Amino acid sequence: MARPPRLLLPLLVVVLAGWGSTTTVAPSLASLPAFAAPSTFLTPTPNSTPATTDPPAASTLPSSPWGHACPEACLCGQEPLPLSAPVAEAADLADVSGPRPFMACYGVPSGLADDDPNVEVLRVSNWTVRRLDLWPLRRLPGLRVLDLQGNGVAEISGSGKANPELRVVDLSANSLHILGAFAFRDLSSLRVLNLSLNGLHSIAPQALALPRLRVLDLRRNRLAVLKPHFFSDAPALRELYLADNALSRVPPLVLAPLDVLDLSGNHIIRVEEAAFDAVNVSRVLDLSRNALRRVPNAALRRLGAVRDLVLSDNPLGEALAAGAVAGLAVRTLHLQRLRALATVHRGALRGLPELRELRLSANPDLAYVHPQGLGDVPRLHTLDLSDTPLLALERELLDAAPALRTLRLDNGTLHCHCSLGWLRNLTGGPVSCRGPPAAAHPPCAPYIIPLFPETFSETLGNNASFHCRALFGEGEAAAAGSVTWRTQAGVELSEGQCADGAGRVCVRDHVLTVLYLHAEDAGTYTCEARGAGRDARAVRLHVRDVHVRLLPLTVTSTFVTLAWNMSSAVTNSYTLRVQEVDAAAANASDASRSVTFTVGLKMHSYTVHGLKPRSRYAFTLAIQREAYSLVIGSTEVTTREGAFLVSLGIERNYLSIIVVSVVGGASAAACLGVCGLRCWRQRLRLREAAHLAALRKSDSAFSGREMLSQPGSPSADSPPLQTLFRGITYISLSDERSAPSECGRSIEQDLISFTNKFCSAIERGPSASELAGTTTMSTMST
């Protein structure tokens, strides 16, 4: 019998399926102190209702043991503080022991005439009130614990300044949908606040301005977004419970150093890479019961050292790929109840130097853990694989964990094979397994673990991979064993070989990978294991078409419009190839011209221009995968004759377009020129009219007084001035305008006319009729 390796000698295996020992049992998640309820009344049971005991009659109410009468509708007495050890420690009440004075009332007591500093615990139940006023509690200055759960409170008002000793407030199972600013003002000593089961969806800035708050319970509310101001005013916060809300992502948070951060039971699908840059969680980070598709490894690396990391109950996929959990400073890693997890690949869990416990239990589909799935875990001492349908466990898996002490395989389904001899030697007893009796197979015949299905279907252009792992026994039998793959084309591939030079169908680490599935890749692929015997397992691959049809919508002599239906199976752009087919050999593959267009994913039609009349073209729609073009639709179209567009009246004539454009442009220029000329002439007319008006105004300023003051030398034949002005009784020398005369002219215009005639008469000698007219004009002006 081969001597077991030294690292397995101290190993203790715990199996509850009929073999091994049950001496060592690792603590379950619920039994961890960090996951215990903050207090007996901080975590009320959902849909629970407080007791409905009727209040005792006033005559039967006992007096309080500290000398004051117990208020009406209250019960008074002494009992230990109703706090669990973690909450009592967080509230700085761990040293408070023995019975303490308490008061249980139906409503806030209002019958206290004097202050009662002895009451430390107040319970209020069966009290329906919308607004809670903290002012009546001023009569209880020694109050330390206030229990107000299940009273329908929707609003908080008042100040807690009169209660400097208040450490714990329970407002769970109420109706606090919105938390206003300064809702808990002046509660400077508050350490523990329970707001669970309230339907809370909005928290105002400074609503939680509590400088000494250490434990905040916001479980089972309706918070959908974590905003930076929620917890910025609680610098002493150490435990934050946000489980069972409506969070869908974890944004970058700025928090004080935390001991516990519980984000379980939400709808988180993404944890931003910078989410934990300013967060340090020392004890527990719980991300279980969310919708994570992969482990947020980049964000968790920035977290720092954490004792317990819980990623259970997440849809992380069928396999933990290489590097899925790597480089984390975590002591206990919980990967339990992962839906659809079937395989842990090589190097999936590596670079975890602080890891002590790895819990992979209760995964209903976990069938195989790669022997090199663990790497660089020198301090791992507990590996829990209980309640999993594990088919095989290879000794190499434990080589990476030299400090392993406890291996749990409770309720396992190991396949009976001689390769489990190392485990039998280790436990010193029989190993319970499932499978056909040993006589049905040759001794240590190879056994291919069923890690891939018998039938597999995948869409055209995607990838497919099948992991073939075989058990060969121990020692020389295992060294002599070999695993090969046979493709649908009959090509046999060993480790590291490819079926073609492009590396599209290859075998690496016993995994057959077919990249960018083509229609011709469909068929049967067989894995064969050869050793002391032979075993084979086959998978039939079906390649699904994307069902895209290419249809011509418009066909003319020079362009064609094509359309195709959309397909959700295509995740990148289409490639449309146009190929001109020789008319003499329409079915031949050679072409005289080929053009490729890349069209968008959301496009479903395209018009190809520049085609020849009466020519046959082949149109092909494909999806591109690196150097591979996968055809998903094709059609052939013959363009129309050259006179087709002319018959429709839509032939394009560029000469006509040019002529019409030139004529139209010239007409527009002429029209603009005429309009400009008319504007220029009109402007000249206006300028001349303004100039003439200015001249007329200056002429009207010339008065008769000026003519009289500057008389000229009359000529010899001119009559004397006395003769000229004889008969003129009045001459107006004013420049003011008057009402129109009988002829429709103003006085100013009459004066100008009179002056002109007067001057002419002086120059040539007035006649008797002109002097009479002048006299008449003067009379009219008068």
Image (tube, rainbow, N blue to C red):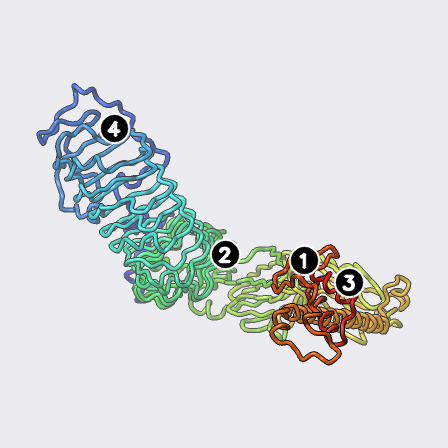
Calculate the distance from the C-alpha at mark 2 to the C-alpha at mark 4.
55 Å
* Closer to the eye: label 2 or 3: 3
Q: Is residue 645 left or right of residue 287?
A: right
**Identity, as a three-letter code, of the amino acid under mark 1:** Val
Q: Amino acid at mark 4?
A: Tyr
Horizontally, residue 316 falls left or right of residue 724, namely left
Residue type at mark 2? Glu
Badge nearest the viewer, 2 or 4: 4
Q: Nearer the viewer, mark 3 or mark 1?
A: 3
Q: Which residue is mark 3?
A: 561
Which residue is the site of mark 1? 546
Considering the numbered disc 1 on the image, is that residue within a helix, a strand or a loop?
loop
Alpha-carbon span between mark 4 and mark 3: 80 Å
* Residue under the point 67% across and 80% down: 713
Measured as percent of width and height from the top left, residue 354 is found at 30, 64
Image quadrant assignment for residue 297: bottom left
First-in-chain label (2 vs 3): 2
Q: Residue at x 86, y 70 (%)?
A: 613
Q: Going from the N terminus, do you reach mark 1 or mark 4 first?
A: 4
- Say how many tags the image has: 4
Q: Secondary structure at mark 4?
A: loop
Q: Mark 3 or mark 1, which has the lower sequence index?
A: 1
Give the numbered dot on residue 106: 4
Pointer 2 residue: 318
Alpha-carbon span between mark 1 and mark 4? 68 Å
Q: How would you rate the neighbour count of disc 3 (Cα within 10 Å): few for under 14, some for 14-19, many for 20 or more?
A: some
Q: Would you call the spot at circle 1 few (<14 residues within 10 Å), some (14-19), or many (20 or more)?
A: some
